[in-house]
C-alpha cells in the first residue's frame, strides 16, 4: 500500500498535475493508494486576493481566524479537483467522519494543529475494500469540531504509519544528496540512523524539514519513506520501484 504526499509546489503546472494524477491512478494496479496534498501556492493567491498577509514560523503557516476562512475552502476544492483528475477517487478533509483529529499547537500559531488521530477504518474501507482512492486535504478537527490547518508532510507520515504503508513525498527536489552542491551525489537509499546523523550536518537548508518528515513517518510505523521530485512525468512508477528519489528505511531491530 502506498501513501502519496503531493506537495503544493509540485502542483503548480496544471498539465503536469493531470499527468501525475494519471500516474496515481495507474499505481492502483499494484495495490491501494491514499493521497495527501498540500496547497501552498493556491492558498497564497487566495490570501493575497483578500489582502491577508502570510506569516511563517518554523516552516508552519501562522493561521488567523480570517486566514482559516480562506484556507479551508481552497484546500477542500483542491482535494475535489485532484480526486476528479485521478478518477475513482474522493476528496476528503478532517470534517469527513473525523478523518483527521488534531490539537491546537498554541504558541501563537493560531488555528494550526498537530495530528493526534486518523480514522484508519475509513481509509481502509475506501482504499482496500472499495478500491476508491482517498485524496486528503491537510485540514483536521479538534475535540470541539473546529477546523485546524495542519502540515501536510506530517499528516502523510501519520497516515502512512497507521496504515503500515510505504510513503512517497512528491516535492520540488530530486532527493537527498550526499553533497548538496553536487547533483551526481544523489543517494538512492538512506537509513534512518544515517539520516539523523546528517541533520544539521551535510543535510541542510530546505532538505531538513523533508528528511524530518520522512523520519517522522518511519517513527509512526511507515514501511519506508521516499523523497522524489514531483516536477517530472513518470516519476511515480520509477520512485515506487526504487529507481528515483531517495528511499529512507527504518533501522533494523534485533529480534
Image (cartoon, rainbow, N blue to C red):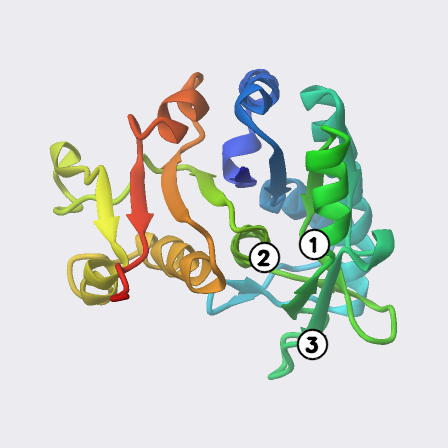
Label 1 SS:
helix
Task: Determine the CA span between mark 3 and mark 1.
Answer: 21 Å
| Residue for point 75% across, 22% down | 88
Mark 1: give few (<14), some (14-19) or many (20+) Cα within 10 Å: few
Q: Is residue 4 left or right of residue 90?
A: left
Q: In this view, does 59 lie to the left or right of 120?
A: left
**Is the residue 221 above or below the residue 245 in the image?**
below
Q: Position of residue 148 (x, y in %)?
A: 74, 65
Residue 15 seen in this snapshot? yes
Label 2 SS:
helix
Q: In this view, does 144 lie to the left or right of 100?
A: right
Which of discs 3 and 1 lies nearer the camera? The answer is 1
Quick one: label 2 or label 3, which is nearer the N terminus?
A: 3
Task: Determine the CA span between mark 2 and mark 3.
Answer: 21 Å
Q: According to the image, label 2 marks what residue?
A: 162
Q: According to the image, label 3 marks what residue?
A: 104
Mark 3: give few (<14), some (14-19) or many (20+) Cα within 10 Å: many
Contact between labelled residues 1 and 3, with CB atoms less than 8 Å apart: no
Contact between labelled residues 3 and 2, with CB atoms less than 8 Å apart: no
Instruction: Give the quadrant of the N terminus.
Output: top right
Residue 49 seen in this snapshot? no
Contact between labelled residues 2 and 1, with CB atoms less than 8 Å apart: yes
In this view, the residue farthest toward the front is 255
Quick one: label 3 or label 1, which is nearer the N terminus?
A: 3
Mark 2: give few (<14), some (14-19) or many (20+) Cα within 10 Å: some
Q: According to the image, label 1 marks what residue?
A: 120
Q: In which quarter of the image is residue 215?
A: bottom left
Q: Where is residue 221 in the image (x, y as percent from the top left)?
A: 47, 59
| Residue for point 52% across, 23% down | 30
Viewer-closest of 27 and 204: 27
Q: Position of residue 15 (x, y in %)?
A: 58, 15
Q: Where is residue 155 in the image (x, y as percent from the top left)?
A: 59, 56
Amino acid at each position: 500500500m502506498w501513501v502519496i504526499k503531493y506537495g503544493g509546489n509540485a502542483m503548480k503546472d496544471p498539465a503536469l498535475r493531470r499527468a501525475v494524477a494519471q500516474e496515481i491512478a495507474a499505481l492502483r494496479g499494484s495495490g491501494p493508494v491514499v493521497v495527501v496534498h498540500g496547497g501552498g501556492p493556491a492558498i497564497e493567491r487566495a490570501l493575497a486576493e483578500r489582502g491577508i498577509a502570510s506569516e511563517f514560523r518554523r516552516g508552519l503557516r501562522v493561521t488567523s481566524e480570517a486566514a482559516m476562512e480562506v484556507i479551508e475552502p481552497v484546500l477542500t476544492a483542491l482535494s475535489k479537483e485532484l480526486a476528479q483528475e485521478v478518477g475513482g477517487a474522493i476528496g476528503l478533509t478532517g470534517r469527513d467522519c473525523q478523518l483527521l483529529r488534531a490539537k491546537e499547537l498554541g504558541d501563537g500559531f493560531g488555528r494550526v494543529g498537530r495530528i493526534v488521530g486518523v480514522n484508519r477504518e475509513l481509509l481502509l474501507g475506501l482504499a482496500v475494500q472499495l478500491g476508491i482512492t482517498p485524496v486528503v486535504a491537510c485540514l483536521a478537527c479538534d475535540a470541539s469540531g473546529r477546523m485546524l490547518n495542519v502540515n501536510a508532510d506530517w499528516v502523510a507520515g501519520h497516515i502512512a504509519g497507521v496504515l503500515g504503508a510505504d510513503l512517497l513525498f512528491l516535492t520540488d527536489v530530486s532527493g537527498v544528496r550526499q553533497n548538496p552542491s553536487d547533483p551526481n551525489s544523489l543517494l538512492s537509499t538512506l537509513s534512518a540512523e544515517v539520516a539523523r546523523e546528517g541533520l544539521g550536518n551535510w543535510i541542510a537548508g530546505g532538505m531538513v524539514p523533508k528528511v524530518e518528515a520522512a523520519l517522522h513517518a518511519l517513527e509512526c510505523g511507515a514501511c519506508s519513506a521516499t523523497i522524489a521530485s514531483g516536477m517530472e512525468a513518470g516519476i511515480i512508477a520509477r520512485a515506487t520501484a526504487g529507481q528515483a528519489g531517495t528511499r529512507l528505511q527504518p533501522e533494523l531491530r534485533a529480534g
